[in-house]
Image (tube, rainbow, N blue to C red):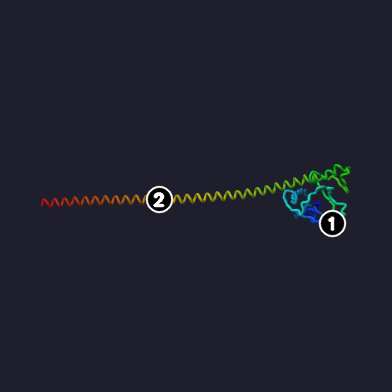
Amino acid sequence: MGKTDCTQEWTLQIWYRLQTDRSPDVFSPTPANLADGRLHRIRIHRVGKNLYVQIDQDVHRKYTLSSDAELISIRSLTLGKVTGMENLDEEVRRAASKGFIGCLSSVQFNHVAPLKAALTNRGSSLVTIRGDLVESNCGALAESTSHTLQDEAASEDKKQHSGSTQKDLAVIAGVVTAVVFIAVCALAVISRLLYQQRRAQRSGGSGMKDEHRHSMCTDYRTELHVHNTIRDSVKEYYI
């Protein structure tokens, strides 16, 4: 037996009891209140022991059942209050006796749509209706709720996009500032090296010129001294 119910706090509760000799598996996918006047979409998918639950677009849960027994033959599918509960335990009987008051826009179990069958085949022997079942404005409510949710989602997406854009701009500005700073530092270092190299070249050139001048003066003085010596010797010879 499988059961989807709302607790006293209007939170979703899912029951699975595939074997009568075992206690039921109870799961509460979300603590949020589902009786908030909005349309909620609940999808329950079971593969063996794995149970997948999706609520709207926000909640995705995976559970593991205590048994992998298959539901071979489904004798009935009940929406609302469960009748004929002689073979049920007290806890399940107490939960199933609440019934359902509210608005359902669509219910589908595999390929079976019990709500649609109840509305379109009221005279069929396969469908039993107890209590008041009337068509309401679920479609209009769903449409207005969907528009409201879409507007809220669009506004939230816009805020997130604006925030992400500002973050991206801040990151880009930081990167550009860092690149400019590194480029300025590199230019300063290169300018310093070029200045030191030119200064060294100038110092080396002036030193070579001074040495050349000094050597020329020394040669000239030596030559002059030699000439003076020769003249003196010549004078001494003639004397």
Three-letter code for the amino acid on which mark 1 is drawn: Asp
Q: CA distance from mark 1 to mark 2?
A: 98 Å
Q: Residues within 10 Å of mark 2 (few under 14, many from 20)?
A: few
Q: Nearer the viewer, residue 135 or 148?
A: 135
Q: Which residue is labeled 1 in the image?
A: 89
Residue at the image position 78 percent from the left and 51 percent from the top: 69
Q: Looking at this view, name the residue that lies furthest to the bottom.
A: 90
Residue 197 numbered tag:
2
Image-based side of 107 in relation to 174, left or right: right
Mark 2 falls on what kind of element? helix
Check contact, mark 1 vs mark 2: CB within 8 A: no
Mark 1 falls on what kind of element? loop
How many numbered discs sit on the rendered protein?
2
| Residue 168: percent from left, percent from top | 61, 49
Image-based side of 84 in relation to 157, left or right: right
Residue 191 numbered tag:
none
| Residue 213: percent from left, percent from top | 29, 50
Q: Looking at this view, name the residue that lies furthest to the left.
A: 239
Q: Nearer the viewer, residue 45 or 192?
A: 45
Looking at the image, tell me whether mark 1 or mark 2 is earlier in sequence order. Answer: 1
User: Toward which corner of the image does residue 139 lie, by quadrant?
Assistant: top right
| Residue 138: percent from left, percent from top | 81, 46
| Residue 94: percent from left, percent from top | 84, 56
Residue at the image position 88 percent from the left and 52 percent from the top: 84
Badge nearest the viewer, 1 or 2: 1
Three-letter code for the amino acid on which mark 2 is drawn: Gln
Q: Residues within 10 Å of mark 1 (few under 14, many from 20)?
A: few
Image-based side of 235 in relation to 117, left or right: left
Residue at the image position 86 percent from the left and 42 percent from the top: 121
